[in-house]
């Protein structure tokens, strides 16, 4: 499956979230990652994120898609996907 | 179609982007909006965003989907979708 993950996490924890997601997904911009994951990876990502964040304060939204979606960029491409795919 | 829009826009222009997107889409968190749009709305959103942003500095990524995707939230829901749908 393909996931797009966006997060709004307090500054104390944001680097930990970023560092962790970078191991599994492609950084898009700001607080956004995306990438193809297996079901097992998906579950692991969710459980680790739950450990890192403060569930009373932080927010992580995960969009779960069947495949890589159509995607357009206006302005600059912060981190071109094409470089790694 | 359904769009998820994430942006990384300089502080001078970010409120303008937010204010504009709020007229068309649902605010999810931080720099993320989503919602159902017609083809015409989609084109209008893109052309207005191009006018607002500095295309040499800012970045807007638009995911275009057929329908509202599966979506999970860890932690708090900054702006529950269910409230408006």
Image (cartoon, coloured by chain):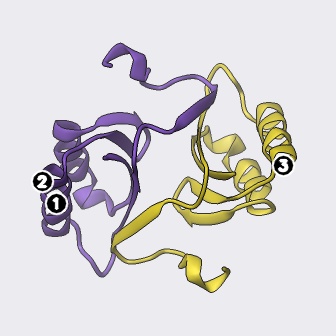
Chain colours: A purple, B yellow
Label 2: few (<14), some (14–19) or many (≥20) C-alpha neighbours in 10 Å = few
Q: Name the residue under label 1.
A: A43
Residue B1, how many percent across, how many down? 69, 51
Q: Are marks 2 and 3 on the same chain?
A: no
Q: Is residue A30 left or right of residue A44?
A: right
Q: Nearer the viewer, residue B74 or A70?
A: A70
Mark linked to residue A10: none
Q: Nearer the viewer, mark 2 or mark 3?
A: 2
Residue B47: image quadrant is top right
Distance between mark 1 and mark 3 Cα atoms = 36 Å
**Mark 1: secondary structure:** helix
Q: Residue B41 carries which label?
A: 3
Q: As displayed, is residue A69 above or below residue B65?
A: above
The chain containing the residue under callout 1 comes to A
Q: Which residue is drawn at the image coordinates 65% and 19% (left, top)? A: B56
The residue shown at (62%, 85%) is: B83
What chain is tagged by disc 3? B
Q: How many labels does the image show?
A: 3
Q: Determine which residue is flagged by label 2.
A: A40
Spot occupied by residue B14 in the image (x, y as percentages of width and height): 67, 47
Residue found at the very far bottom of the displayed protein: B83
């Amino acid at each position: 499956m393909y996931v797009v993950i966006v997060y709004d996490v307090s500054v104390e924890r944001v680097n930990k979230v970023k560092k962790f997601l970078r191991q599994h997904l492609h950084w898009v911009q700001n607080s956004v990652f995306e990438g193809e994951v297996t079901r097992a990876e998906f579950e692991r990502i969710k459980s680790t994120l739950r450990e890192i964040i403060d569930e009373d304060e932080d927010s992580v939204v995960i969009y779960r898609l069947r495949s890589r979606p159509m995607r357009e960029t206006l302005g600059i491409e912060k981190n071109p996907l094409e470089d790694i795919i």
